[in-house]
Image: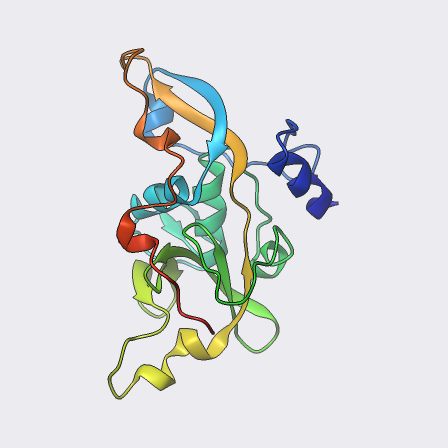
Amino acid sequence: MIARARRALVHGVPLTAAVIGLAVPRVATAQHRTAAIAVRGTVTGADIVRAARDYLGVRYVWGGDTPRAFDCSGFTRYVFARYGIALPRTAHEQAAFGDAPFPGDLRPGDLLFFSGGQGAQHIAIYVGGDTIIHASSSSKRVKLDLIRPHGGRWAKHNWFRNRLIAVRRVLPMEGTFYIPMSATASAPPASTTTAEGPASFRRAPTVY
């Protein structure tokens, strides 16, 4: 059912979170605390990466799903919810959401899943340039990491490289943008860009 809802959204048919049986978590951000208008539009990987970077340094706590503290799946769910896109709560559940791209075809905003003994146990958002952003249990914070270090004695022993088991592509998808009331009508918001990120994010990804 989730897959059917995903395809309908991609083809431009308006759907709500209720249709796919998911609830969008409540998001409390500056954009919601100030006067803003909600506008429907296409959410891209660049939008998700931009939002995810707002939480760099937020501490990791198992079960955390707000900017006070995140765990890995709580982080991804919250970031997507900023645009009205509902993801399931756990990494295992999120692995069933979206489409599987061809191996090596990584794009900003993709969800990357890593094994931890029993299926998908960790999740991250692909930023570009072999880099992910995630809530790290070992570093106890939201941070950036390389999924494949370029050279060096530890490159072949990289945890992320060895444990990457799945990639899911949710975007582009119809979502909600919040435009400050103070914004001028002639100045389009930066978040409505259709680009998939800066040029440095669009280089050919590593094939796993």
Residue 67 location, quadrant = top left
Residue 30, compared with residue 170, is above or below; it is above
The residue drawn where x is 39% and y is 66% is 137
Q: Quadrant of residue 23?
A: top right
Q: Looking at the picture, does residue 166 appear above or below residue 199? A: below
Quadrant of the snapshot with the N terminus: top right
Residue 140 in percent (x, y) is at: 32, 63
Q: Is residue 66 above or below residue 128?
A: above
Q: Is residue 67 among what the camera can see?
A: no
Residue 33 placement, left or right of 101: left
- The answer to whether residue 184 is above or below residue 132 is above
* Residue 125 seen by the camera: yes
Q: Residue at x 29, y 12 (%)?
A: 186
Q: Left or right: 119 with respect to 193?
A: right
The structure residue drawn at horizontal position 35% and vertical position 65%, both measured from the top left corner, is 130
Q: Position of residue 74 (x, y in %)?
A: 48, 51
